[in-house]
Image (tube, rainbow, N blue to C red):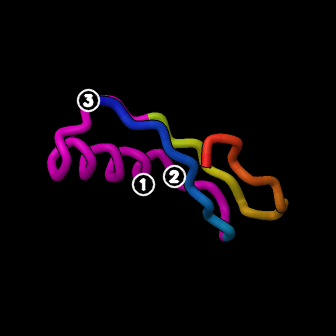
């Protein structure tokens, strides 16, 4: 199973260790083997076209 997500992180981008922890949690808790996480600061008003 795969997941693509936008993460709004106003305080800045996650470190590599944070991304590793997030993908590990997705793998162990939800059996998601491949995650693509797009990190945004949330400084614009654009909406996701898929929402």
Q: Mark 2 highlights which residue?
A: 15
Q: Position of residue 43 (x, y in %)?
A: 81, 64
Q: Is residue 15 magenta?
A: yes
Left or right of residue 20, residue 45 in this image: right
Q: Which residues are magenta?
A: 11-35
Q: Residue at x 81, y 54 (%)?
A: 46
How dense is the environment of label 3, judged by Cα within 10 Å: few (below 14), some, or many (20 and up)?
Answer: few
How dense is the environment of label 1, judged by Cα within 10 Å: few (below 14), some, or many (20 and up)?
Answer: few
Callout 1–callout 2 Cβ contact below 8 Å: yes
Task: Find residue 49 and name its label.
Answer: none
What distance separates the C-alpha of mark 1 from that of mark 2?
Answer: 5 Å
Q: Mark 3 highlights which residue?
A: 1
How many numbered circles does the render carry? 3
How dense is the environment of label 2, judged by Cα within 10 Å: few (below 14), some, or many (20 and up)?
Answer: few
The N terminus lies in quadrant: top left
User: Tag 2's secondary structure?
Assistant: loop
Task: Find residue 18 and name its label.
Answer: 1
Q: Position of residue 28 (x, y in %)?
A: 15, 47
Q: Residue at x 62, y 61 (%)?
A: 8
Between disc 3 and disc 2, whose residue precedes? 3
Give the foreground label among 3 and 2: 3
């Amino acid at each position: 199973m795969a997941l693509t997500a936008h993460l709004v992180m106003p305080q800045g981008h996650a470190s590599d260790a944070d991304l590793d922890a997030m993908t590990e949690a997705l793998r162990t808790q939800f059996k998601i083997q491949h995650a693509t996480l797009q990190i945004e600061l949330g400084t614009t008003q654009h909406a996701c076209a898929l929402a």
